[in-house]
Structure formats: C-alpha cells, structure tokens
Amino acid sequence: MNELSKALGGIPVELLHIAIGLVGLAAFVGLNAVLLVWMERKVAGHFQRRPGPFEVGPHGLLQTVADAVKLIAKQLFMPKGADRILFWAAPFLAFLPVFVTLLPIPWGDVIVAHEVNLGILLILAFAGLGVLSLCLAGWSSNNKWSLLGAARAVAQSVAYEIPMLLSLLAVVMMTGTMNLSTIVESQGSWPWLWLGAMQPFAFLIYFICALAETNRAPFDLPEAESELTAGFHTEYSGMGFGLFFLAEYANMIVVSGVATALFLGGWKGPVMDGPWWFLIKVYALIFAMMWFRWTYPRVRFDQLLNIAWKWLIPLAIINLLATAVYIKVIGLNLPMM
Amino acid sequence: MKERKKLTFWETVKRQWSLVVGLKVTGKNYIKPQITTHYPRQTVDNISTFKGHVQLVGKPKQPDVAKCICCMLCVTSCPSSCIKVVKMKPPKEDPIPEAAAPKDMPDAAQPAKQAPPKAKAPKTPVKWTLDFNLCSLCGTCVEVCPVKSIEYSNDSYLAGYSRKDFEYDLLADLKERAAKMPAPAPKKAPKAVEKETAEQAEA
Ligand code: SF4
Ligand code: SF4
C-alpha cells in the first residue's frame, strides 16, 4: 500500500479510492436519473396502455436528455420575499447527502466506494438530512403550498423513521454487523438463503418506509401535485428543481440498494454472483415502486401516521423481539457464517 | 364526519388483500397491448364515428346542391349565433316587367299582378357559413333542420393560423366534397350504412 501511495506522489490510496468512487457515483447518479425518468414515464404509459415518450430517439430514449437540456437552460427564479440563502441552499442540501449515502453501498464483491463499518447508520443518518432540505425548501419559498409541503415532509419523517430503524435493527441483530458488505457476505446465492426469506416482515416494513422516505406514491404527501401544486418545490425552476429531481431518483437507488443488500442477497444471485445481480434487483424494486405509484391512491396525513404508529411500529417491535428470542433461545446459523 | 364501522384486527389484516388485487388489475393492464394510435404514422379506422363541425348535406340527385330550404330555423335556434344563411334573391324576370309596366298600366294594378311570381322565389341558399370559433357543437342545428340538411362531418384534423381559418363557407365545402366523389349521392349513403352496420356487428 505504502509503495503504491509513494508511486502516486504521496496521495493516500484510500483518498484516491474515495475520489474515484465519488466520480463514478456522480456519473452513475446522472445516468441513472436519465434512465429512471425515461423508465418512469414509459412504465406509467404502459400502465395506462399508451406508449409513453416515443418521438425523441428510438422509443423516446433521448427524451430525458432533451428535458435535461431544457431544465439546465431555464432561468432560475426566486419568489419575492423568499429567504435567499435558505432557498438556494435547500436543493444542494437535498442532493449532496445522496453521495454520502451511496458511498457504503456494495455494488459487487469489491466494488464499494468506501467500506464503512457503520454503513447502515451512515445511510440512515444522512437520509434524515433529506427531510431537512424539504423543510427548508418549503419554509424559505414564501408560498403557502410550499409551507404545507414542508409541514407534511416533517410529519412524514416522524411517521416512517422509527419503524424503518426497527426493521433494520432486526437484520443487524441477526448478522451482528452494520457493514453492508459483511451483511451481503452472510447471505447465500439462492433466494431462500437471503435474509428477506428469514425476515419477511422486516423487509415489508422497510419497503413501506422506504416508499415514504423517497416521497413516492402512495406517500408523496410533500409534493401532492393534485392538492399542493408541487408542494415544497412549487417555486423552484430550472436546475433548482432539477437537483430535487436528481436527489429523488438517487434516493430511490439508495433505498433499493439497502433493501437489496440487506434482504435480497446483494450482488449474490443464482448461477453467477456479480454486480449485475445487484443492479437487476435494484431496478426490479424500483419497478415495483412505480407499479405501486400507478396502483395506490395517495394516503392522507393522518392515515400515514396511523399506518406507521398503529401498525408498523408494533409489528416491527414484535418482529425485533421475536428475532432476539430466536437468536438467544434457539440460536442462529446464517448460511454463510 | 361519518361514523365508520370499527374493524376488528383480523378484518383489517384480511382487507390488506385488496392491495394485491389492485396490483393485479394494474399489472394486467401493463401487459395488455396498447390502445394508442401513433398518429402521424397510423390513423384510426373508425373515423366515421367522429362528430366534428357541422356540414351541409347535398340532394341525393344533385350532390353539389344543399338540401337546405332556407327556413332559417338553424340560424335562429343556434345558441351561439354562428350560422349565417342568405337566401337566393328572387329571379331577375321581376325588374323587366316592372320597368315595362309603368308605361302601359295604371300604378294601382301593378302590385296585385306581380305578387304571384315573387312567391315562387327559389328556396336555395346562396351563402351558408359557419363560424366554428363560436360553435359549441351542441347539435341543435342538426336536430332542428326540417329537411335534414345538416350533419356532423368527420373532419378531425383541424389546424389553422388564425380565427379566419375556422370560418367555413359550407356551400363551397359541399361543392368540393361533391367534386371529389365520382358518383357521390348513391354511393355515399350505402357506404355510411355499411360502416355503421359493420361497427354494430363488431360491438
Ligand atoms: S352545433 Fe350548436 S353551436 Fe354549433 S352551429 Fe349548430 S346550433 Fe350552433
Ligand atoms: S334549418 Fe336546415 S333548411 Fe333551415 S336554413 Fe338551416 S340548413 Fe337550411
């Protein structure tokens, strides 16, 4: 290691690793957003038995690129009476933590931007910042819809954070680590060797909370276009809006990536392990999210709190207790440990 | 707020099945073939069911002459006042006797003698225009016409640069349509009927 570091002119190898990882992630986030927006519109179209974007490029593949160019070229507006600093800080606050949450995600056996022993904790902590950005965006816009969206975002985070933590805790108990790579290592290649098979309730609770975390339907209360125009990002134009957009799609990758690593065996899969399995699972989960979006109506504020506090939290606690009792009394041997 | 029936724990759990049912419904539609027509490359084949702006109907034997008898019912009943009909002027024989008359006949006798030819004035319109900008496609004119001279067109491909483009001279439009069909009157009617019966059979 030291030799390599010397050869690179004294730059620590670990720093280089993170730098390369970040560049790779930035490229991936951009590319992924382009792909997912296209996918979202195509999927939406097919659910309504229409083709979706079709004219720009083969099957509308370049439509998102055209949209991105439009967004970048648009003028940035700020409403009268808005808080200048907070207003412009919010989109960055939404977008930048996403990189940190992407760092510990194990794409493959050795493809990790940065091994973090407390990976899950890091992701949860920085995902929490997303709510702050929504809150600031809504607060600083000087717009009633935005403010309502911000209030909803906060109420929503109160609802989903706790059951999410509890459901992940069950997995941490079983594997005894918060390192995502190690958790993947502890699972086998076949679906019945994945942790999701042993912890179906935890997986279910996590996935429901993940929908709320990413502000996806049926929990898209903060943007609720039919009641709040666009909620917290009503006043954002051009790339201000674009950054929120990028963050939303990157967040989808993060929550699906965590679900894949923790419950679906990560990069392990039947026949041949590898990063392709990780990507397939992540995009399958994202497809499921889109499917939910076109199936379920948006829940109301109090309904979300009811679901979370009356159902998910008790269920998560029972699940956690059962896991603890099982581990202590019967003992556990994970497939690969 | 309406009082809701309290559900027991198991009822609530059981009702979650409806979430799966919902997914099934949307999933099925996802797989089914699309029903959208890619317009410029494809066009729909049941355009005859489209009811566009109104148009005039020609006489069975003279397809380029409208059936209209200038009763003005459509003009007066149109809620948007978008129809203008101008009746053809009485024939030109009138002025000639009029010019000749004063020479030999006494003034008092004239009106009585000339009244009968005036009553025979033709009932064909010389101008029949529709301002489609105002039309609400309410269909009143179609229903009210005593000789069924108004029908809906299938003209769905409308685009124009100004309001003027939507002020239609329907008499000219009728002539144009008549000129396009080789043997219009006998052919057009059965064709429409055929299409309709075909559609009914399909349905
Ligand atoms: S459809 Fe109605 S609005 Fe249009 S011209 Fe006929 S009567 Fe007038
Ligand atoms: S109602 Fe029919 S006949 Fe009467 S003026 Fe209108 S088109 Fe002509």
Image: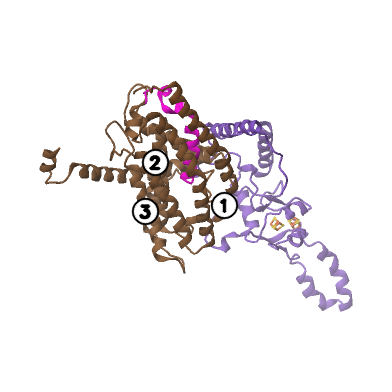
Q: Secondary structure at mark 3?
A: helix
Circle 3/circle 2 CB separation < 8 Å: no
Q: Which chain is purple?
A: B
Q: Nearer the viewer, residue A45 or A170?
A: A170
**On residue A226, which mark appears?**
1
Residue A62 in sight in this render: no
- Chain of residue at mark 2: A
Labels 3 and 2 share a subunit? yes
Viewer-nearest of discs 3 and 2: 2
Query: Which label's residue is closer to the chain start, 2 or 1?
Result: 1
Q: Is most of the magenta stretch helix, strand or loop?
A: helix
Q: Position of residue B82 (x, y in %)?
A: 68, 62
Say yes or no: labels 1 and 3 on the same chain.
yes
The percent coordinates of residue B70 (x first, y second) are 76, 59
**Magenta-colored span:** A187-216
Mark 3, other Cα within 10 Å: few <14 / some 14–19 / many ≥20: few
The circle on residue A254 is 2
Q: Colour of chain A?
A: brown
Q: Are marks 2 and 1 in contact (CB under 8 Å)?
A: no
How far is disc 2 from disc 1 in space, using C-alphas?
27 Å
Residue at the disc numbered 3: A69
Q: Which quadrant does ligand 1 occupy?
A: bottom right
Query: Which is nearer the eye, A8 or A30?
Result: A8
The residue lying at 33 percent from left, 28 percent from top is: A185
The answer to whether residue A315 of the structure is visible from this angle is yes
Residue at the extreme front: A329
